[in-house]
Image: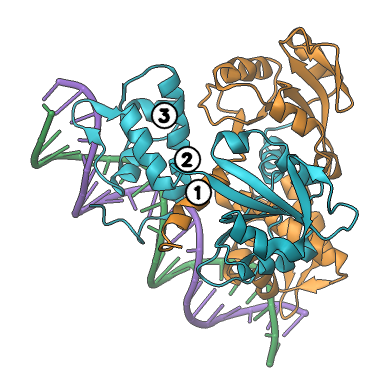
Chain colours: A cyan, B orange, C green, D purple
Amino acid sequence: MSNAQSQIPEVVIFRLPIYLYMLSLLTEENTEVVSSQELGTRLQMTPAQIRKDLSYFGKFGKQGKGYHVKTLSAELRKIIGLDQEWNMALIGVGRIGKALLDYGNLALRGFKIVAAFDIDPQLIGKKAGGVIIQDTRELSKTVNNKDIKIGVVAVPPTQVQKAVDLLVGCGIKAILSYYPVATNVPSDVRVRKVDPMFALQTMTYYLRRLGPV
Amino acid sequence: MSNAQSQIPEVVIFRLPIYLYMLSLLTEENTEVVSSQELGTRLQMTPAQIRKDLSYFGKFGKQGKGYHVKTLSAELRKIIGLDQEWNMALIGVGRIGKALLDYGNLALRGFKIVAAFDIDPQLIGKKAGGVIIQDTRELSKTVNNKDIKIGVVAVPPTQVQKAVDLLVGCGIKAILSYYPVATNVPSDVRVRKVDPMFALQTMTYYLRRLGPV
DNA sequence: GTGTGTGAATGTTTTCACAGCG
DNA sequence: CGCTGTGAAAACATTCACACAC
């Protein structure tokens, strides 16, 4: 049915969860149908962009009416891959790692940290966020047993490549890293780097340019 | 000296903290000088892009050598506005709010939550992450007393506009919101929306397209 | 020789504008 | 009529390629 596959810009993929999020808000408000106009207002983007983005995946709208909220929601969930649960392995149970283990929203949105690993012997065997911290040597076995598809790397910069290698060795194809260091991975493995501080650090640039306060 | 001001693309601003981060790693390694080539390799971007980005702000490199790590670091910190401490007010001490109060990296990087607010009477007066939770009615007074320049909004979607209005009313010009709902603000106020889940939610798209596993 | 800074060229993303459908 | 879906145009961002400085 859909041809889809390769030529969809990455920015478009990045926006899909945003649409989905707004659709979930609309569902809560019992809105049945929404136009690209209305979505655009709520998300502060142009209606044309929303229509074009969605058109990469199919024709979900009805002319003269708009988009059926529930239907579009379901379609997007399928496209993004959120119509299933995803098991994740956490490498590194330091500050960020612990915060992730305690972060309730993960489970709410279908992501579950089902195993945690560290190299610190002091931590191994301890319990955190419902899982027992394991030695990294058990990674491969656990990935298979627990059907883990996503790796989350929360180790210091110097250890990132090592952690990534471990995950890649177990057949993991999607890795979220909490330090933006470059990593060497086969081309079919996707590493996404996030830093919770970057958003703050870009705002100060603009604060400075507002004239003296 | 610098003309700077308006015409610098926002994507460039977003990359500055990334450069700064890599420079801090290089400093730890006692590297004195680095080329755009080397930076590019480490950050997985083209040298040309790095040079062009930096050239928006001045000429920091030396031909034939590269960039002096410490000097460039210092310059970038000045440009981004990280050569000072920033006081922040948190609105909403729920799950995300509490996580932020406990997040050590904030202070390490020069950001400090110096006041927290909520409307829940059960929370007001309690202590969290070193600050006492206050009634939002005290916001204005506290913003002035504590020289607060950044607001962090961690309240449910339906309350975001209200919280943002409060902050804007106190003269706050930079707001970080943990839900990507559109907000109405004067044009000199910058609202940045972050959702810690979006990075995950885009990876599953690509996971699905890797052929059956 | 080596690597920056930068116009010009190329590539990508967004917006426009309108045909066509409900 | 109103609103989608979409080629074509405009805006924007990245990369090239080279003169010049060390």
Q: Nearer the viewer, residue A44 or A180?
A: A180
Give neighbour class at mark 2: few <14, some 14-19, many 20+ (Cα, 10 Å): many
Amino acid type for the residue under numbered disc 3: Leu
Residue A173 percent across, percent down from the top left: 55, 62
Q: SS class of the residue under badge 1?
A: helix
Evaluate whether label 1 is on the same chain as label 2: no
- Residue under label 1, please give it: B202
Instruction: Give the answer, above or below, for where A176 lies relative to B118.
Output: below
Q: Residue at x 78, y 64 (%)?
A: A159
Chain to which the residue tagged by mark 1 belongs = B
Chain to which the residue tagged by mark 2 belongs = A
Q: Nearer the viewer, residue B48 or B150?
A: B150
Amino acid type for the residue under numbered disc 1: Thr
Q: Residue at x 41, y 40 (%)?
A: A77
The answer to which quarter of the image holds residue A206 is top right
Tell me how far mark 3 sits from mark 2, CA to CA. Answer: 10 Å
Residue B3 percent across, percent down from the top left: 65, 50
Amino acid type for the residue under numbered disc 2: Pro
Residue A202 percent across, percent down from the top left: 67, 43
- Residue under label 2, please give it: A17
Give neighbour class at mark 1: few <14, some 14-19, many 20+ (Cα, 10 Å): many
Whether tag 3 and tag 1 are in contact, CB under 8 A, the answer is no
Tell me how far mark 1 sits from mark 2, CA to CA. Answer: 7 Å
